[in-house]
């Protein structure tokens, strides 16, 4: 079974109303966050440094993966081709959108898209970011989930250090 991709690639990102409200179930985006572009985020051309943006995406994807997989031991496995489409300047606000596209036995695959909230232009797209759930031994471990949650019920309740300390 194939699914048709929307003609407008930005349709996968949240549509933010004048009040800033977003309904994740309505727009298909599972997780989104915003950042303000500051002087320390700029490259020599005075535009957003790609490395800063990738760091933000990886961090947000990790948070999203931890919530979806219910495991604080979720690690980045793969980031596919990164397509830089436009940029942002100091003072611009950007919005990063992530959408889970596939749950594997030990992994979660998602898609990322970033856009400039001021110009409304897409800044970057990444078709595949894969996170893997690890067990205490550091090897891939089944997570047992097949679908997205919009609730925080999968957030790990035990801090990773407390489980380690209990074994001492």
Image (cartoon, grey):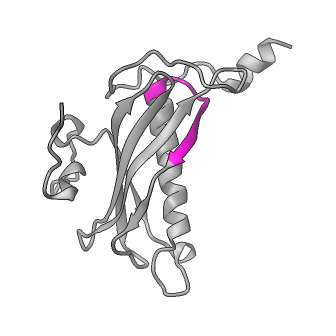
Q: Which portion, as a residue range, is magenta?
A: 68-78
| Residue farthest to the top, as pictured | 167
Q: Return the x and y of residue 38 as percentages of the image width and height.
A: 49, 73
Residue 16 position (above or below residue 44):
above
Question: 107 left or right of 74?
Answer: left
Question: 100 left or right of 37?
Answer: left
Task: Name the residue: 31% across, 28% down.
Answer: 150
Q: Return the x and y of residue 54 as percentages of the image width and height.
A: 51, 60
Q: Quadrant of residue 85?
A: bottom left
For the N terminus, give its image quadrant.
top left
Q: How many marks?
A: 0
Question: 36 left or right of 148?
Answer: right
Task: Name the residue: 40% across, 75% down.
Answer: 91
Residue 146 position (above or below residue 97):
above
Question: 32 left or right of 21?
Answer: right
Tell whether position 117 is magenta: no
Task: Name the residue: 55% across, 86% down.
Answer: 44
Q: Return the x and y of residue 7 as percentages of the image width and height.
A: 13, 56
Observer-nearest of 145 and 23: 145
């Amino acid at each position: 079974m194939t699914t048709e991709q929307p003609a407008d690639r930005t349709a996968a990102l949240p549509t933010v109303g004048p009040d800033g409200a977003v309904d994740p179930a309505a727009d298909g985006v599972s997780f989104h966050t915003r950042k303000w572009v500051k002087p320390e985020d700029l490259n020599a051309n005075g535009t957003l440094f790609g490395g800063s943006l990738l760091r933000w995406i990886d961090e947000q994807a990790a948070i999203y993966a931890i919530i979806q997989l219910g495991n604080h031991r979720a690690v980045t496995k793969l980031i596919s081709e990164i397509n830089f489409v436009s940029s942002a300047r100091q003072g611009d606000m950007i919005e990063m959108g992530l959408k889970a596209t596939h749950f594997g036995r030990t992994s979660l695959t998602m898609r990322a898209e970033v856009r400039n909230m001021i110009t409304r232009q897409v800044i970057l797209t990444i078709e595949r970011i894969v996170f893997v759930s690890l067990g205490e031994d550091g090897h891939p471990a089944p997570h047992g989930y097949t679908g997205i949650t919009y609730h925080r019920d999968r957030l790990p309740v035990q801090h990773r250090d407390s489980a380690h300390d209990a074994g001492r």
